Amino acid sequence: MTASFETLASLWRIAGLPGDALSFVDLTGHDPVFPSTFAVGTAAQSTIAAAALAACELAHIRGAPRQRVAVDMTHAAVECTGYFTLDGKEPETWGPFSGLYRCADGYVRIHANFAHHQDGALRVLGLDPATATRAEAERALVHWRAGDFEEACAQRSLVVTKLRRFDEWDATPQGQALAGQPLMTFTRIGDAPPLTLAPLPETARPLSGVRVLDLTRILAGPVGGRALAAFGANVMLVNSPHLPNISAIADTSRGKRSAHVDLRSEDGRAALWRLIGEAHVFSQGYRPGGLASLGFGPDELAARRPGIVQVSLSAYGTKGPWAGRRGFDSLVQTAMGFNAAEGEAEGAGKPRALPMQMLDMATGFLMAFGAAAALWKQQREGGSWHVEVSLAQTGHWLRGLGRIEGGLGAKKPDIAAFLERVPSGFGELEAVRPSAQLTRTPAGYDRASVPPGTSEARW
């Protein structure tokens, strides 16, 4: 068995899916495929294969014959880079103040891609956001201890973290809480009969007829929704009209309709309930408790739409003192020890990030896997289901896949063979084709990506 197949099999066991389905998967390639000492290729390949195979297993329970699923590791890893261009240009994805900064006793990473996060961090440094320069921020931070700046920002709900080694992370209360959590959880949260899913002809894609509400905004959640769309689901991205998005929305919205719903208004909440009333999957990535405070928590959804599958994403898991803390892939990498470990392996004495936002990407495909697997359970057993994942739990899992000796010496692969150009509502989009190859019903996107609010909020 390859490392990827064993990793896929372990994911399959977590979900309790039929073991004989694993004989229908073909995994090719091996790490390293990108310069990293971590098994990013295995993480990419196994999570993408899990999502595709679970979608096919749901189709099988609906009457379609099983089909083979093949995933090449290089293609999977390239898909996880999130590479795309618009009208031939690669959009800027990082804010001018985002990145690592030296402090008096180490480093901190600031995530400043959104103006309110950037301005808040600058104000903590005593700088005027209207006039501050990065050089001024660098000079100010050398007078701060990393942990003090991290805590000062956390108290203001900003997104900053101290650089830690693995042993330092393991010693934190959050690291200890995380070590006791599984990679992902499937929880039955109420009784309900199986939701009606029509029998599936063998020519239909695996998730045809499945309606998915995608209430996610940054990277992991949108990637999960995009994967479900690639396997045939009817995915509606629901954005707030008053919250910002990142440029990657042009890529991650492929295959989706995109509607605005303002949950601050009574009309907006009523519109979302109407959508929920016909949905099979509700995927959300807002801060823990955020949607529940508006009346859209797991128990409320299960009561109003018995049988629904809910998928919830957080940064640091559901337990421990950081359970409610905001976070993004780059911050979680830094906090948990990945940047320090890659830097030490390189021998340059400087932290080094993973070659892609692997925590985001693997978590996104785990969300798609969890949705399809929970739908399979729902069709077999009934009930409403809640799937929970987090970037930090994925990070703990990635670390557990082991290190790749000499991995930093790998050359980045040529990605040209994996790209396609398509029109979109953002301009001509060049992006990576789905790496999961289904023999009978190829994965792909029926809809071009469109800006938020283009579609009406109705099925």
Image (cartoon, rainbow, N blue to C red):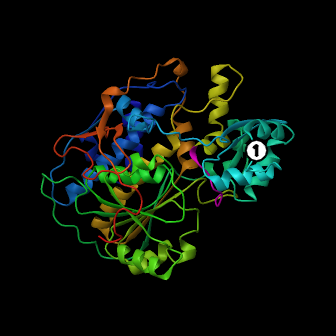
Total numbered badges shown on the rendered structure: 1
Examine the rendering and report whether any part of residue 306 can be seen. no
Give the quarter of the figure containing the C terminus. Answer: bottom left
To which quarter of the image does residue 207 belong? Answer: bottom left
Rendered location of residue 190, percent (x, y): 42, 75
- Compared with residue 429, is residue 310 higher up or lower down, i.e. above or below? below
Q: Nearer the viewer, residue 59 or 324?
A: 324
Residue at which label 1 appears: 132
Residue drawn at point x = 57 percent, y = 53 percent: 181
Write down the region rendered in magenta.
Answer: 323-329
Residue with the most extreme right position: 143
Give the quarter of the figure containing the N terminus. Answer: top left
- Compared with residue 90, is residue 458 higher up or lower down, i.e. above or below? below
Q: Amino acid at mark 1?
A: Ala
To which quarter of the image does residue 436 belong? Answer: top left
Magenta stretch, main secondary structure, is loop
Residue drawn at point x = 81 percent, y = 40 percent: 141
Rendered location of residue 52, percent (x, y): 30, 46
